[in-house]
Image: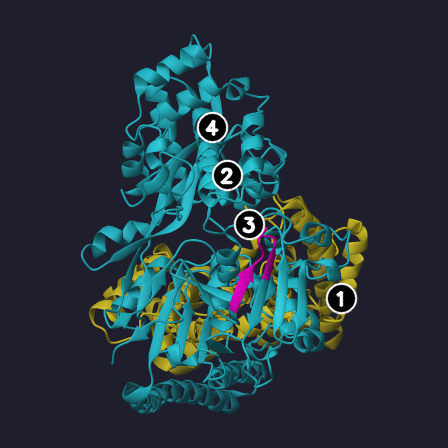
Amino acid sequence: MSKYIVKRVIAAVLTLLVLITVVFFLVRLMPGEPFTSEKLNPIVKENMIKYYGFDKPLIVQYFQYLGNLLKGNMGYSMKYTNKTVNYIIGSTFPYSADLGLRALAIALVFGLLLGVVAALNRGTRLDVFCVILAIIGTSIPDFIMGAVLQYVFGLKLKVLPVAKWAGFKYTILPSCALAFYTMASVSRTMRASMLEVVQQDYIKTARAKGLSNFRITWKHQIRNAIMPVITIMGPTVAAVLTGTFVIEAMYAIPGMGKYYVDSTNDNDYSMILGMTVFYGAFLIFCNLVVDILYGVVDPRVRIGK
Amino acid sequence: MKKASKMLALLLALAMAASMAACGSSDGASAETTAAAEAAETEAAAEEGAETEAPAEEAEEPAAEEADAGEAAGEKVFKFATGTEPTSMDQSKGNSIADNEVQRALQEGLVRLINGEVQPGLAETWEVSEDGLVYTFHIRDGLLWSDGEPLTVDDIVYGFKRLVDPETASPYGWIAGSDASHILNADAVLAGEMSVDELGVAKVDDSTMTITVDTPVPYLLSLLGSCTEYSPVRADYVEQYGTDFAATAEKNVYSGPFVLTSSENQELHYAKNPNYWNADAVNFDEVVQYIVSDDSTRVAMFDSGDVDYVAIPNEQVPLYEGQDQSYQNGNDDYLYINSASETQPLLQDANFRLALNYGLSRTEYISLATNDIYDPGCTFVLPMLSGVNGGTYGEEYGDKLSAFPVDGDVAKAQEYLKAAGVEDPSSVTVELVITDAESEKLIGEVIQQQWQTNLGINVEIRQVTYSEKYGTVLPSGDYELAYGGWGPDYDDPNTYLALFNGNSPYNYSNYKNEEFDALMAAATTEQDVVARMDMLAQAENILLEDGAMVPLQYRTVHYLMNENVTGINFTVGAVNFDWPFGDIAQ
């Protein structure tokens, strides 16, 4: 097992290095420049180029960046000139992660529940209801979901705040809006996977052994059916926890979502790189955890290695 | 709260992992059920936890409201939401109106421009030498920074020097130079050709300093009063924090009406600065500025009573008819014409450029492209800038300018087209550069459609990003027509007209007219303000008669304001929303 984990970690570090290299050179190919405004004059621009060290050869800048990154320093943002990328990520990630964890908890609890209930009651009205809910969830984009919740509960019923992040009350609407899509996809995956498991021979064996329904469902069906859900959890956790542009903007949550879009629009090189490295590392980490979880959940994976 | 949720998630994950691990063991029948039960319990507990948290929060709420009530007894709190995050909290590195608006509350300059009038600031009095080149400022006694340290002439002089020091790399360093303030040697210092000590800003004694300019600058005081990049800076803080100076609230000190108490989490918290020299004029005890990038959310926060002021996004203006107020923010939008274009040589011909101008009905354009929110622009210089006889520039000089007809003039446009030698308009294609902003797409389409109908020429639209437009397209001259605009940096027509100077770095139009350049040069050295303004108006007329650009619109901003709030000014120039001396009735 430990050998397996070491191998995965090495692969992860290599992936990250490739990612950094590709992004570092790709952003420089983007049209436009980081220092642009209708009022910037050429002399001032020269000074700024020197200040950020862009007058050095690209390859030198690349190794400098890698060197700084090893020390954990991602440099200064070029748009928000006196903030470091570390500071921006450090101060916004907790909000995104907080929102993401809440949404994820809602999505997992209800998604799994709906999926299991639907599968166990296949063909009944309950199943149809769950399936419709899942279809609605996957087909309504989060900006509509978010706007509807904000309008109904915030502006019309006035029971919950319309925006900001200042206490439990404030977290309900954005967490639900964000959870909806993930919940729907979890329930769909879980239902499909449960239906497959139900037809396996070992379920028949378990029934023949006279195990109780609860034991069969919990021990044999859910446990085997949950593998695909774990698979989609890796990228989902990474995506949900590192901020969402739409929901965070709509509810004025000071998360990191807006910096993905803004940094690209502004050609803020250090910020784009920082966000990519952070997201990449986080995604790789989540996938690593999923890989390890496979081993934990499914003994066959362990034996295979 | 945050910790609780993280713990919760961790517990959930652990419980899941534990239950699954237990499932893995062959004889774990009982172990597994316990783990499962535990997992279930944890989940239930978590849910309960979440529920129990709610009442706890609510229990806190009344307390908070009581605090609010306490505030109502004496504390005046003003809350507002804006859309743009300031790029820097370092007063020397401001780069936008959003930056300047923040600094105007936090720092004080030599003078302060309030509603168009120059008022004393750190300087109590000042005088200008007869030749208009040397400004002497007499600094108040007993000035203090927010931390109680004395605010000295050295701090003020250092603020100027730091702005132009190439090492600072301030994006607004140019404001000191020949594009605006004309401070002696500023251009050379910026370019690194002279030491920063040779800048024309000097301490005379402990209460006197001078600013020397290389040519008379009639608008210098108004510029000093609005340009927050000229604020004093504490050298010891800059030394202590280096590039982190002003990165957070406690890494800077404040000389203005307010101190910054926090700039975390997209919220700026200001508190009244008791050490401000004019603290008696400051009414708000506390101000909160929420940075909310989503337009609709901002307005929703006003509707739900969370904020006292918010600007309305254009598309929602009709919904608030009757409740809203408006002001012109000074943004003047027009089409750049590359008058040296090689891909479309017709643009080098004034007749063709005039055909473009006359072939556009600005009334129709405003209605289709801006929902009738903006005002049509038929001349170039913003008419609401100050004139020389107490009126606005528009009032005093408007009828002397060859303004384009607001409804266009198709017959005249056709004549100009013929004069430019265009026999078959359908064979002519011009390219219009716009950015990928949704609003610009509509603007591009309306112009395209009007020129196709009125002139019969084809218009191709090329979309680029904002940074591409100002980073490469305009500076390199690789375009034919481009949508853009300019907000005034100071209250004088020069801020616009200088853009067409043959040697200006901002002359993206590649416009070259010796008569115009000569007139502008003469205006620069003219000491008589009326004669100077006459010259500037003549210069603008040359541009209009030459069709040097296609003026489109002057922007108007609609906003919602709590009716208890008074004393807030809306101005053009470095600052639009000028709130530090506002008041709120209890």
Task: Look at 76% across and 66% down and name the residue there.
Answer: A68
Q: Which of A303 and A290 is in front in this view?
A: A290
Distance from Cα at disc 3 to Cα at disc 4:
23 Å
Distance from Cα at disc 2 to Cα at disc 3:
15 Å
- In the rendered image of this protein, which colour is used for chain A? yellow
Task: Look at 59% across and 46% down and name the residue there.
Answer: B179
**In the rendered image, which residue does mark 1 sit on?**
A68
How far from the left and from the top, in percent, is residue B536?
Answer: 47, 37
**In the rendered image, which residue does mark 3 sit on?**
B217
Tag nearer the camera, 3 or 1: 3
Q: Which of B546 and A57 is in front in this view?
A: B546
Q: Mark 4 lies on which chain?
A: B
Of the numbered discs 2 and 3, the one sitting upstream in the chain is: 3
Q: Give the range drawn in magenta.
A: B125-135
Q: Mark 1 lies on which chain?
A: A
Which element is circle 2 on?
A: helix
